[in-house]
Image (tube, helix red, strand yellow):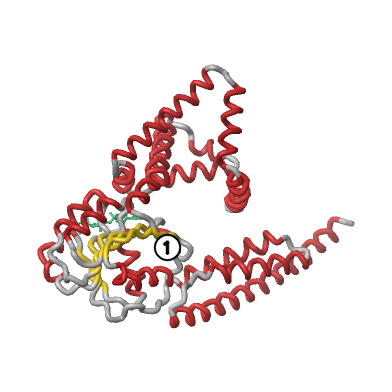
Amino acid sequence: MSRESMVAKLTDLRNKIDEVDKSLLGLLAKRLSLVAEVGEVKSRNGLPIYAPDREAAMLASRRKEATDLGVPPDLIEDVLRRVMRESYLSENNKGFKTLCPQLRTIVIVGGRGQMGRLFDKILTLSGYKVQILEREDWPRAKALLADAGMVVISVPIHLTIEVINSLPRLPDDCILVDLTSVKNAPLQAMLSVHSGPVLGLHPMFGSDSGTLAKQVVVYCEGRHSEAYQWLLEQIRIWGATLYRSSAIEHDQNMSFIQALRHFTTFVYGLHLAEENVDLEQLLALSSPIYRLELVMVGRLFAQDPQLYADIIMASKSNLALIKLYYQRFEEAITLLEQGDKQAFIDRFKKIGRWFGSYAKSFLMESRVLLRQANDRRK
Ligand code: NAD
């Protein structure tokens, strides 16, 4: 084939690809508008925006149809999951059914903060009247709270107990809720200042997630649970999954999920900074997994240091856990010092057995993430 005819052939094929892409775009626009209609019906009828069973069944069918057409099933699943995420985000900006229309005003204490703003937005979109009580508003707190149907505490962790203790007497039927990342101390404080319904919530996501769809919200029962069932149901409508936990169990798990993780990330960041590594060079040399790891470390330092200090220093048991981890580090370093490769391998295998089938499924799950990370690489 001459060079001219090769160029002509390629141009022709590329034009055809462009046409297919345009058709795909048209189909995408059509799908998004159909999903928007589904969203309308759901919100009017109070159905959750995330329907796990429907999603799983739909993906299974598309995977099978893709295989029949010779299209890799993972490809269609990737594409559809991305499209669905877009739909969740847009559904999140529409209204939701008001499950408790008779509720009096909701007051969010700290409502102009990150989490407070998110709850202000979503509660307002769900038809509730929301007012904010910020730092400077305490002189009029009594008036603001006198007729509150629900009070949501969303202030920095280290101020939470003090703020709860400063609340004026609330109406007996007022629901007192907090969003704190630690649960036991705030829950106990709320139970002791208020004799009405009390609920502890922990949204397990950052305020930048954009949607509650597919997110987890932990709830810790306080008192008079019948009074706040509508709120739990409302959170389900927003698309989140609820996980019930005792406050103590929550805090124990959070020591691992948050305190230990954030602290080790902090130390890793500290080490990179102290060694003054060349981040650009590290990134250039990093395969997707190392890039992703670096991204997960670096993102911590773009966030609120006070929040992380509070989470890590929330309890003495966090410190004890971190010290235990430090001890494990020393034990593992001893293996290196002794040059005991076999002991290292034995340990490695033992840990693998402890992870059991999770190790394999984590490997599969991370593969998908790593491929996506690589797609974004410029
Ligand atoms: P933030 O610092 O962004 O907001 C706190 C807000 O409280 C601010 O607007 C501040 O002005 C206000 N405030 C401070 N002192 C006050 C006082 N005395 N009275 C009234 N308002 C006062 O903090 P945030 O990240 O939104 O965290 C709030 C709560 O949400 C915390 O308990 C945190 O554990 C929880 N939380 C946050 C996240 C997150 O990613 N941001 C995730 C899960 C849970």
Q: Quadrant of the N terminus?
A: bottom right
Left or right? Give the position of 196 relative to 375.
left
Image location of residue 365, percent across then percent down = 59, 51
| Residue 17 visible in the picture | yes
- Above/below status of 210 relative to 285: below
Count neighbours of disc 1 (C-alpha within 10 A) and say few if under 14, some if 14 to 19, many if 20 or more: some
Q: Which one is in front, 259 or 31?
A: 259
Q: Quadrant of residue 10?
A: bottom right
Q: Is residue 100 above or below residue 196?
A: below
* Residue 74 left/right relative to 155: right
Say which residue appears at 57% left-offset and 63% top-offset.
82
Q: Is residue 377 left or right of residue 250?
A: right
Look at 13% across and 65% down and name the residue there: 169
Where is residue 42? Give x, y as percent: 48, 79
Query: Which residue is farthest top?
Result: 338
Q: Quadrant of residue 198?
A: bottom left
Locate residue 146, reporting x and y percent.
14, 72
| Disc 1 C-beta below 8 A from ligand 1 | no
Where residue 333 appears, as percent x and y from the top left, is 49, 23
Q: With 297 as the anchor, is 30 left or right in this view?
A: right
Residue 22, compared with residue 209, is above or below; it is below
Task: Determine the image quadrant of residue 164.
Answer: bottom left
Relative to 132, residue 362 above or below: above
Q: Find numbered disc 1 in the image and state the secondary structure of the residue it sits on.
A: strand
Residue in the picture at 53% in, 36% down:
282
Quarter of the rendered structure image containing ligand 1? bottom left
**Residue drawn 60% across the image and 66% down it:** 56
- Residue type beneath disc 1: Leu
Residue labelled with disc 1: 242
**Front in this rendered view, residue 155 or 189:** 189
Q: Is residue 378 visible?
A: no
